[in-house]
Image (cartoon, rainbow, N blue to C red):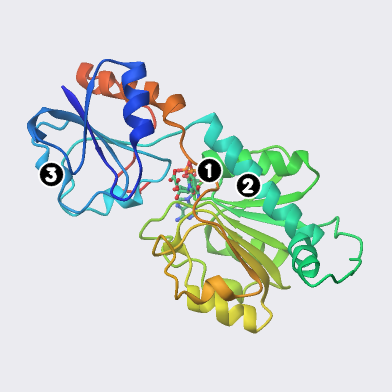
Amino acid sequence: MQIGIVAPGRDVRNWSSAISRHSGIEVQVWPEVTDPHKVELAIAWNPPPGLLAKFDNLKLISSLGAGVDHIISDRQLPDVPVVRIVDENLSRDMSHYILMSILNYQRGTYRHFLNQQIRHWENSKNPNRNLKVGILGLGVLGKAVSKMLVYHGFKVIGFSRSPKTIEGVISYENQEGLRTLMSEIDILINLLPLTRETKGILDMKLFAMASRPFYLINVARGGHLVESDLIKALGQGLLTGACLDVFDEEPLPANSPLWDHNDILVTPHVASITNPDTVVAQILDNYHRVKEGRELINQIDLQHGY
Ligand code: NDP
Ligand code: OXD
């Protein structure tokens, strides 16, 4: 048995060395796969469509991260289970990124930074201490983020497919719930998986539901956001600004208008990055489970798409 890593454009040397530290299993890294028949476990990030089908002895596919949209969009996906990463470090890093974004927004850090470039002294007003934060997606990451925000004194409202009970968090489902959430928030965080239902959810229709200008933080997927609607909505004052970590096309092309927009902060998909050392054990555990016919952990429901 061998492990195949398929992650075009990503440096996966840390994955190969983590796997050898945790097991003696041989690793083949695409495109240098010489014997696809030996690959029983594929660890994938954005695999070229049709490629995983070439591993004719495959037993399991694991995403290299929390999301699986980049794997299950493959129309020739082999008929084997797909699992994803759930890891405390991912949740903590995501929570820290969100806290940093909110505090930078609340305290006007970027205005101070820009003012420093021109030696301009401008005292800001008192920070708004009553910011209401809406979170789309109350899964593993959304839940961790919501608890952290409640701990830091923010009012938090969440939205998910099924009802949730999280201390200090009001939670909504369905279209009516989404409308209510939008009418109450000052900041909107997107932590939904990218599926047929959620693609393009961050569009003008949603932005127009807000009852006051709000700040958008998109850390889920670029496919959730209709970029032209964001720029239009910023121009119309529906939004006060946006912090974007994920994009339809990554790396973000040099000619994207998002780079130059004064009210948009761009970060290069770094909100929360999987550390192979802390997750290789769960991936291998899942491989053994599949071989022994036991229940898998963090398995994707292909019907729901997450
Ligand atoms: P989960 O699968 O644990 O949670 C998904 C949440 O979204 C659930 O609460 C689910 O509802 C809800 N949801 C799904 N579909 C809908 C829908 N149609 N309407 C309403 N709610 C819906 O995912 P994670 O929290 O682990 O991760 C979320 C996403 O974050 C990932 O898919 C990935 O794209 C992104 N990510 C980004 C990173 C970055 O660095 N920028 C790092 C890691 C992840 P329910 O609970 O009812 O099922
Ligand atoms: C992930 C990501 O899905 O990094 O883990 O976006």
Where residue 22 appears, x then y in whole percent? 36, 17
Residue flagged by tag 3: what amino acid is it? Ala
**Where is mark 1, residue-wise?**
272
Occupied quadrant, residue 94: top right
Task: First in sequence, mark 3 or 1: give its number.
Answer: 3
Looking at the image, which is closer to me, 183 or 276? 276
Q: How far apart are marks 3 and 1 (CA)?
A: 29 Å
Identify the element where label 1 is drawn: loop
Ligand 1: does it lie within 8 Å of the C-beta at label 2? yes
What percent of the width, then of the height, locates residue 253?
Answer: 42, 69
Q: Is residue 75 left or right of residue 73?
A: left
Q: Which amino acid does label 1 sit on?
A: Ser
Q: How crowded is mark 3: few (under 14 residues within 10 Å), some or many (20 or more)?
A: some
Q: What residue type is labelled 2?
A: Tyr
Report if residue 204 is visible in the image.
Answer: no
User: Which label was assigned to residue 53?
Assistant: 3
Q: What element carries label 2?
A: helix
Q: Name the residue under label 2.
A: 97
